[in-house]
Image (cartoon, rainbow, N blue to C red):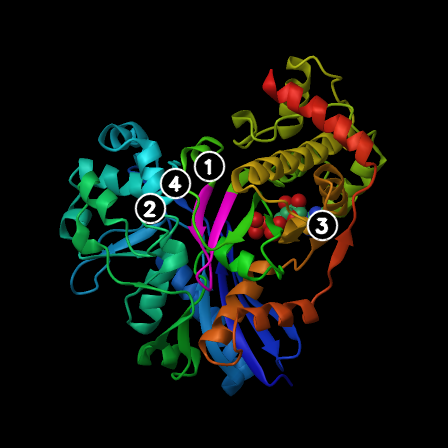
Amino acid sequence: MPKKVFIAVDLGAGSGRVIAAKTDFSTLELEEVHRFDNPGTDLPDGSYWNLIGLYREILTGLRTAVERYSDKIVSIGLDTWGCDHGLLDGKGQLLGMPHQYRDPRHEGMPEVMHAILPEVEIFAQTGVATNFYNTSLHLLAELKKQSPGLLHADRLLFTPDLLAYWLTGVQAVERTVASTSQLLDPRSGDWAWGVIETLGLPSRIFGDIVAPGTVLGPVRAEVGRQIGRSDIPVVASACHDTAAAVAGIPMTGESNLWLSSGTWSIMGIETREPITGPDAFKEGFCNELGVDGTVRFLKNIAGLWLIQECKRQWALDGEDITYAGLAELAKEAESFSAFIDPDDPVFSSPGDMPAKISAWCERTGQTVPKKKGCILRIATESLALKYRMTLDKLRQLTGRNYARLHAGGGGIQNALLSQATANAMGIEVVAGPVEATSCGNIITQMVATGHLPDFQAGRQLIRDSFEFITYTPRDTEAWEAAYTRFRELLDR
Ligand code: ADP
């Protein structure tokens, strides 16, 4: 039996999981104790999350964990996607159901916001450029329509903060998730009060911010009765899932890059100071905060969404192929037959991805792929070349060289992509762990509860517990030539 168990609640925009991490502090083993769907719901007035449903699923998962591990459980931590939030009145009552970031209320808001404060200025103050999902735009929409929720709100809590409040009765805003709002100052780690006031948002709703790894307190007595133990503390872990993933990717030193590889690819560096100048803004980078006082200077790139959507389309057409099967098809196909820009907006919406890839190749005068393997190979190699482009921009913006890429997340199981990434970038790729997000959530709890001295010890524990695969660059000349072709194609 393990000596201790830590519970990670990891909510994604499609599903959620409760994970038990069992450890004797020399190795770590993860066990999924509960998994559930997280379907957003469209109502006549917008798109919402069923947060009470999620809360009940979390209780079910916690009850199962307590049944299995009872007094070995040390603490609970939550991480979720960023930006979304609920508003509470002075008595802690939720004022309206929380919207999804996809809710169309953001439409037209960038123009409204940038007329008040130019985007480059917002970037300088918050480190975040405007994206439809940012909390800033959604609050501005509520302000414009004088929504009763915002008028009566006393406190804003992000999704993981709100769920932690329901579990513990303690209201606190965790810093990594707050840094996705476009309303936080990445230098002070406090709210960007200048931006908040200029936009006319009510400053009273922006409460105290706590660092990732703050113990909030034990679960409420009622929660204790439902899950079978009333003395388990909830830790505000790295509450933004990307912050957790980066914490869980065991990098060594600042000469390394990280890649969180899943439905989307997020690539960046872990640094101490935000980079908020006009060049970083122009190149589409942003600054979010991480554990241990770090800044995640990062760029969002398209990801395995391209392959997920091909898989989905072929299944609709009657051929359900596993990811391993798709990888085989891609491996057998010819290299460099054509390229796409994975970040072209045509690829970001759902729907017949293979046809979209073929159409893109045709439109740009390239060989049109006919076979599945060929389509997959084009998507894979183009993604790797886009990573290379991001590496070049990072080199330019920071004036530094990078020796290695550490990649974590489900996408690293695609070995063809991992090798292509090493080849395209011309640097070593170290892949692992697949469960980077849960690992980061867990080590944050271990440090918070005094079971580990610091995050370095946490990353060492991850290194000692999971399999890591190192990919060294191959065929570099051919990949350099491909990169030249790729850039010319995207410059056209
Ligand atoms: P999310 O970002 O949605 O959490 P994950 O980290 O779970 O995504 O990664 C999911 C992606 O990982 C899938 O889209 C798929 O492309 C890839 N993947 C998962 N399993 C495998 C596998 N066995 N072989 C190759 N790729 C895989």
Task: State the residue position of label 1.
Answer: 280
Residue 12 image offset from top left, x and y in percent: 49, 53
Left or right, 372 with respect to 220, comes to: right
Q: Which mark is residue 99?
A: 2
Task: State the residue position of label 3.
Answer: 429
Q: Secondary structure at mark 1?
A: helix
| Residue 375 seen by the camera | yes
Mark 4 or mark 3, earlier in chain: 4
Chain part drawn in magenta: 286-298
Labelled pair 3, 1 in contact (Cβ < 8 Å):
no
- Please rate how many residues cluster around mark 2, counting C-alpha atoms within 10 Å: few if below 14, some from 14 to 19, many from 20: many
Mark 2 or mark 4, earlier in chain: 2
Q: Farthest residue toward the front?
A: 399
Residue 168 image offset from top left, x and y in percent: 33, 73
As for residue 288 lying within the magenta part, the answer is: yes
The correct choice, above or below, for 168 with respect to 228 in the image is: above
Nearer the camera: disc 2 or disc 4: 4
Left or right, 8 with respect to 425, comes to: left
The residue located at (28%, 72%) in the rendering is 169
In depth, the one of 77 and 16 nearer the eye is: 77
